[in-house]
Image (cartoon, rainbow, N blue to C red):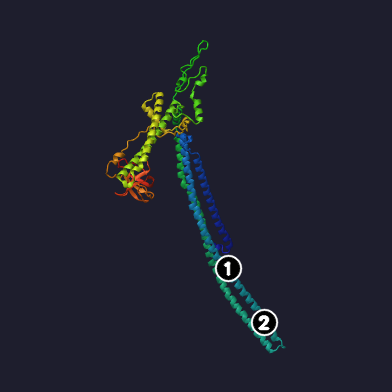
Amino acid sequence: MSWGTELWDQFDNLEKHTQWGIDVLEKYIKFVKERTEIEISYAKQLRNLSKKYQPKKNSKEEEEYKYTSCKAFLATLNEMNDYAGQHEVISENMTSQITAELARFVQELKQERKSHFHDGRKAQQYIETFWKQLEASKRRFERDCKEADRAQQYFEKMDADINVTKADVEKARQQAQIRHQMAEDSKAEYSSILQKFNHDQREHYHTHIPNIFQKIQEMEERRIVRIGECMKTYAEVDRQVIPIIGKCLDGITKAAESIDQKNDSLLVIEAFKSGFEPPGDIDFEDFTQPMKRTVSESSLSNSRWDGKSEPKPGSKSKGKLWPFIKKNKLSLKLGGGPEDFSNLPPEQRRKKLQQKVDELNKEIQKEMDQRDALTKMKDVYIKNPQMGDAASVDHKLAELGQNMEKLRLEAQKFEGWLAEVEGRLPVRTEQSRRQSGMYDTQNTSGLNNCAQDRESPDGSYTEEPSQESEMKVPVTEFDDEFDDEEPLPTIGTCKALYTFEGQNEGTISVMEGEMLYVIEEDKGDGWTRIRRNEDEEGYVPTSYVEVYLDKNAKGAMTYI
C-alpha cells in the first residue's frame, strides 16, 4: 500500500501526521532525558548516603570497624558506592546512545520533511495555476462564442431589413465574420490548454504527487523504525549493568556471611579486659564481740595498684568493689590522664603502653630512614662535588640525630612503665605475650574510651595503635655500599610520567615518556636515583616516574 496512490488527495492530513510523528520523537527524547537526570540524581544520593555513613578518620567511629559486623557494613557502603556508579553508567549511555542520536535524527527528519512538503506544495500550486489558466481560456471561448452569435443575428436582421443600406449590411456581415473567427481562435486555444492541462494533471496525480508521498512515507517509516531501535537500546543499556549490579549485591551478601559473632565477642574481651581477679568472699564480721571491725583481706581492695589509699574504717562495702570505675570515668570526661596511663586497669594500661612504644619505634625508624637517605646523598656529593655541596646536609643530619635521641629516651621511659605493668600482670609465656601483642595491634582498640584522645601533662596527644607489636631497627648497609668507588649497578628501568626540571644540585632533568635506568630505589624520602648514561645520573621525585625493578637485583622491591 502506497500513500501516493491511496492518499493522493490527503496532502494536508499527511502534513499534520508527519508533524505529529516528529512530536512523538521529541517527547520520547524528553522522556529519556528525564530518566538520565533521575539516574544521576539517584547515583548522587547513593554516593552521599555511602559517604555519610563512612567512618570518620581518627575518630572513635573509625576504631569500631575492627568488628566483623562493622566491617561488613563498611563493605556494604563500598558496594553501594559501586552500585551508584552503575546508575551513572546508565545515564551516560542513554545520553550518548539515545538522547544525542535521536536529537540529530530529529533535526535531519525536520529538514527532509520540509523539503518534501515544499516540493508537494510547489506541484500543487502549479496545477492550481494551470487550472485557473484553463478556466480563463474557457470563459474567453464562451464569451467569444456569444459575441459571434449576437453578431450573426444582427447581420441576419440587417440583411432582412429592406430599409438598411447595402453598406450597412456589408459592415454587419464583416463584423459577424470577425466574431466567428475570434470564437474559432478561442476554441483552438481552449482546446490546446485543455489537452495540456489534462496531461499535466495526469502527471501530477499519477507521477509527481505519488513520488513525493512515497518519499514522505519512507521518511515516516524510518522514524518508526528508529524509535523502535531506541527503545531496544533503552532496555539494553539497563541490561548491560545488571551483571555488575549483581556482583555488588553478591559482595554485600559475602560481607554479611563474613560476620563472625565469636570473633567480635573476643574483641570485646580484648578491649575491656581489666586484668583484675574477681573479688573473694567477704568474711563475717561479728559485731557481738568488742573488737574493731576490719575489712577482709580477701576483698578486692588489696588488688588495687600503687598510689591508692586504703579505705577508711566503717566505709560501706559497696564502695570497695571496682574502685577504679567511677574515678576513671570522671577523669575521661575531663579529657585528661597521666602520661603513664596509670588511671587505666592493668590490662588496658599494658595495651596502651605497648601501643605507645610501637609508635615511638616507628617514628625512630622513620628518622633513621631519613638519616640514611641524607647520609647516602652526602656520600654522593662527596664523590661527585658537581652534584651538590656535602656540607649542606650536615645541619639536617644533626637535627635528625637529636630527634632520634629524644625519641629513644621517650621509648625507654614507656618501655620501663610497660615492664613494670607486665611484672604485675599474671605470668604469661613469651609466646602468648607476643600473640596477645599481635592481636592487640591487628584489632586496634576503638571501644576503649579510657585511652582515646587524652592529653599528656606536657601538652602532647597520644596517637592510636600502630600496626606492629614490636619494632626492630634494621642495620643499614649504605655506608658499606658507598665505600666502593665502582658505579652503582642498574636494578631496573623507569618511565618518566611527567617532565621534571632538575634545577637543584643532585637532581636530574627528565622529559615525559623518557626511559631511564634505576640505580637506587626510594628509601622513604620520596626520591629515586636514576641514570641516563655513564655521565648523567641524579635524583628525581619518585611520584614522577613509573619504576620497573629487576626481581633478580639484590634488595630490589617491585613497586609502581
Residue 278 relative to residue 483: left or right: right
Say which quadrant the C terminus sits in: top left
Which comes before the other along the chain, label 1 or label 2?
1
Residue 46 relative to residue 488: left or right: right
Residue 190 % position (x, y): 60, 76
Q: Which of 74 and 165 is in front in this view?
A: 74
Amino acid, disc 2: Ala
Instruction: Please name the residue shown 52% across and 12% down the image.
Output: 287
Amino acid, disc 1: Gln
In which image quadrant can residue 554 be found? top left
Instruction: Please name the residue shown 60% across and 79% down the image.
Output: 185
Instruction: Please name the residue shown 60% across and 73% down the image.
Output: 133
Of discs 1 and 2, which sits in the foreground? 1
Q: Which of 34 and 356 is in front in this view?
A: 356
Above or below: residue 146 compared with residue 313: below
* Residue ranking furthest to the right: 163
Specify few, some or many for label 2: CA neighbours under 10 Å numbering under 14, 14-19, or 20 or more.
many
- Kindly indicate whether the residue at mark 2 contacts the one at mark 1 (C-beta within 8 angstroms): no
Above or below: residue 5 compared with residue 538: below
Residue 438 % position (x, y): 39, 31
Residue 151 is labelled as 2
Above or below: residue 497 compared with residue 176: above
Find disc 1 in the rendering and name its residue.
125
Q: Which of 433 and 206 is in front in this view?
A: 433
Residue 392 % position (x, y): 35, 43
Disc 1 versus disc 2: distance between alpha carbons? 39 Å
Residue 541 % position (x, y): 37, 45
